[in-house]
């Protein structure tokens, strides 16, 4: 455990942190005494003490053990005083939403002041609370203590195992609902997709425009070469063009003009179509076409509902398989 004196000196909570240290020592003494007095009632312990020190055993039995509750009340008085002082400062600083919230938040401190039965052992929670507060303000550092690492490790294991089982149980319930319930895809379409259809259309239209601007533009030269190659190959296989090429003097020139002209026309048409997709004038019909496509795809269908149900169940099975993976074991294996 590390102790940071500089943090203690510089903290605005220094007076209360000093009190925390004092209360921590006092609670340790009180609980140690309480444990000893509880064990003192055991016949075996008392015989052992009588063997070690008969005088002390007789004195403790006649003077202290019979009046232990009075000694414990002295500790309780200190604990209650500290509780009331902290409550007063919490009210002054408006730490909580209402003035009476403090006793409910620090219920363990209040119940631990009851000097009877098992209530006394709630003072252990006071120790935990104080240590946590000192750790929070970086006055002490107990993160590397073996006990802390041990508790943290198995608390994480416990939380993960419990949460995994809860999640799997919930997913099993969802799968049962999907298997025997109402049409799933129809509900998804009516309650999720259709209300958000304008956003879907806008997103698709923006992606199409983005493709025209950012994907097509860098590839224009490649498209031109591809079209030239396709046109040249097609013209070379055409018998009429081959006949023209055999004309003396002008045959070759005419063939090249035809090839170049056709290639330029095809490329310019395609280029204009693609470039116009990103223009504002074409956004209207892009959105209309997208709207019609979505409407056709989302028409009610028994096959669509069955397929959607199967897909959702398979997806949830994958989620359950992931949840079943014990991450804490993987952390132990990982160096």
Image (spheres, rainbow, N blue to C red):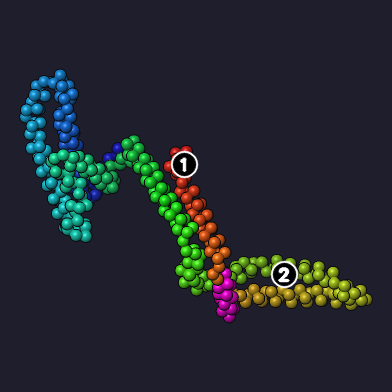
Helix, strand or loop for disc 1: helix
Judging by the rendered image, the residue that carries numbered circle 1 is 330
Name of the residue lying farthest toward the front: 180
Q: In which quarter of the image is residue 277?
A: bottom right
Measured as percent of width and height from the top left, residue 333 is found at: 47, 38
The residue nearer to you, when weighing 9 against 250, is: 250
Residue 295 falls within the magenta-colored stretch: yes
Q: Which of marks 2 and 1 is nearer the N terminus?
A: 2
Q: Mark 2 points at which residue?
A: 224
Question: Which residue is found at the position 34% from the left and 35% from the top?
Answer: 146
Position above or below: 13 against 99: above
Q: As drawn, which residue projects farthest toward the top?
A: 51
Which segment is the magenta one? 281-297
Would you say residue 328 sits in the magenta stretch? Answer: no
Image spot of residue 314 (x, y percent):
52, 54
Residue at 46% across, 56% down: 176
Is the Cβ of the residue at disc 2 closer than 8 Å to that at disc 1?
Answer: no
Q: In this view, does 207 lie to the left or right of 248?
A: left
Query: Of discs 2 and 1, which sits in the foreground?
Result: 1
Camera sees residue 4: no
| Secondary structure category for the residue under label 2 | helix
Magenta-colored segment: predominant secondary structure: helix
**Drawn side of residue 142 relative to residue 70, left or right:** right
Q: Which of 61 and 228 is in front in this view?
A: 61
């Amino acid at each position: 455990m590390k102790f940071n004196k500089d943090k203690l000196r510089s903290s605005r909570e220094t007076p209360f942190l000093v009190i925390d240290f004092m209360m921590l020592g006092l609670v340790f003494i009180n609980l140690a005494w309480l444990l000893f007095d509880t064990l003192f009632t055991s016949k075996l312990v008392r015989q052992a003490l009588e063997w070690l020190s008969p005088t002390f055993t007789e004195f403790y039995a006649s003077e202290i053990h019979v009046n232990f509750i009075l000694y414990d009340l002295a500790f309780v008085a200190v604990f209650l005083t500290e509780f009331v002082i902290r409550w007063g400062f919490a009210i002054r600083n408006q730490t909580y939403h209402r003035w009476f919230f403090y006793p409910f938040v620090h219920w363990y401190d209040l119940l631990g002041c009851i000097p009877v039965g098992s209530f006394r052992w709630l003072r252990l929670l006071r120790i935990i609370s104080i240590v946590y507060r000192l750790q929070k303000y970086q006055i002490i550092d107990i993160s590397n203590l073996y006990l802390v690492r041990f508790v943290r490790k198995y608390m994480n294991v416990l939380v993960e195992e419990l949460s995994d089982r809860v999640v799997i149980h919930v997913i099993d319930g969802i799968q049962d609902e999907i298997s025997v319930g109402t049409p799933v895809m129809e509900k998804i379409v009516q309650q999720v997709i259709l209300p958000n259809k304008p956003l879907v259309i806008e997103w698709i239209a923006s992606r199409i425009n983005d493709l025209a601007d950012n994907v097509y533009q860098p590839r224009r030269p490649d498209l031109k070469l591809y079209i030239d190659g396709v046109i040249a190959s097609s013209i070379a296989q055409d018998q009429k063009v081959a006949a023209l090429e055999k004309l003396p003097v002008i045959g070759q020139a005419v063939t090249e003009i035809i090839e170049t002209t056709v290639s330029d026309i095809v490329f310019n048409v395609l280029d204009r179509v693609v470039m116009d997709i990103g223009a504002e004038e074409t956004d209207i019909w892009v959105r209309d076409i997208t709207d019609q496509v979505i409407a056709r795809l989302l028409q009610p269908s028994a096959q669509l509902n069955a397929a959607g149900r199967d897909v959702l169940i398979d997806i949830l099975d994958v989620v359950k398989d992931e949840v079943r993976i014990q991450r804490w074991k993987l952390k132990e294996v990982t160096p």
